[in-house]
Image (cartoon, helix red, strand yellow):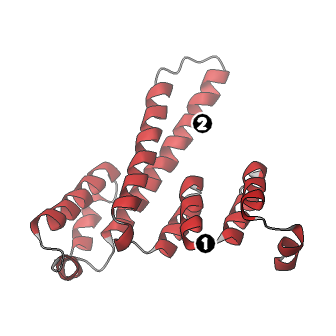
């Protein structure tokens, strides 16, 4: 039985899915020598568990941001929304978890696939960090343009010395 078969059990419960993936990663990390880990993980699963964990965190972030927007809307309408501070704290925690995951397992994660996930979930901080690591300035610039983030576009142009002529040449 592969881990993918077990993951299907948790399809509707991301919290339990994340706990299970964490458990597998921790067990492999703590119980095996460095040289044995890749072989054992490959025997257990055909998927990259670090990528799956990142996707779970991004999915949670997306849901929390949607909840936060709903709470802000309700607050603007005069409805008392007691959970706004809790939601903001959860968003900060998930951001921190994403950063820890990508830093701790950076050598085990495909950066291009990470960038793909960050773009799908529109996670600006992740897109920025990954594009900078991969030296993909124009891709970062295009992402900011597509997300209508003019201040970030200007930041990239100033920070990298991109000239307007070189931008026009790529379009």
Q: Label 2: few (<14), some or many (≥20) within 10 Å?
A: few
- Examine the image and state in which quarter residue 124 appears: bottom right
- Left or right of residue 81, residue 4 in this image: left
Q: Position of residue 27 (x, y in %)?
A: 14, 63
SS of the residue under disc 1: loop
Q: Are marks 1 and 2 in contact (CB under 8 Å)?
A: no
Q: Residue at x 78, y 54 (%)?
A: 154
Q: Residue at x 71, y 56 (%)?
A: 147
- Examine the image and state in which quarter residue 105 appears: bottom left
Q: Position of residue 81 (x, y in %)?
A: 52, 21
Q: Is residue 73 above or below residue 50?
A: above
Q: Is residue 77 above or below residue 90?
A: above
Question: Is the N terminus in the top left, top right, bottom left or bottom right quadrant?
Answer: bottom left
SS of the residue under disc 2: helix
Residue annotated with mark 1:
135
Q: Label 1: few (<14), some or many (≥20) within 10 Å?
A: few
Q: Nearer the viewer, residue 8 or 86?
A: 86
Question: Is the C terminus in the top left, top right, bottom left or bottom right quadrant?
Answer: bottom right
Dot placed on the residue nearer the N-terminal end, 1 or 2: 2
Q: Position of residue 149 (x, y in %)?
A: 74, 51
Residue annotated with mark 2:
69
Q: Residue at x 48, y 48 (%)?
A: 61
């Amino acid at each position: 039985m592969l881990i993918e078969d077990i993951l299907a059990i948790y399809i509707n419960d991301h919290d339990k899915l994340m706990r299970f993936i964490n458990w597998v990663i921790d067990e492999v990390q703590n119980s095996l020598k460095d040289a044995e880990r890749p072989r054992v993980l490959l025997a257990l699963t055909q998927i990259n568990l670090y990528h799956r964990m990142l996707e779970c965190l991004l999915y949670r972030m997306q849901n929390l941001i949607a909840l936060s927007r709903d709470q802000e809307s309700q607050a603007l309408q005069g409805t008392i929304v007691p959970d706004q501070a809790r939601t903001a704290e959860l968003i900060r925690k998930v951001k921190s978890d994403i950063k820890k995951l990508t830093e701790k397992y950076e050598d085990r994660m495909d950066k291009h696939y990470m960038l793909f996930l960050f773009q799908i979930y529109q996670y600006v901080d992740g897109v920025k960090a990954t594009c900078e690591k991969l030296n993909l300035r124009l891709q970062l610039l295009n992402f900011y343009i597509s997300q209508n983030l003019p201040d970030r576009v200007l930041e990239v142009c100033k920070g990298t010395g991109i000239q307007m002529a070189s931008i026009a040449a790529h379009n």
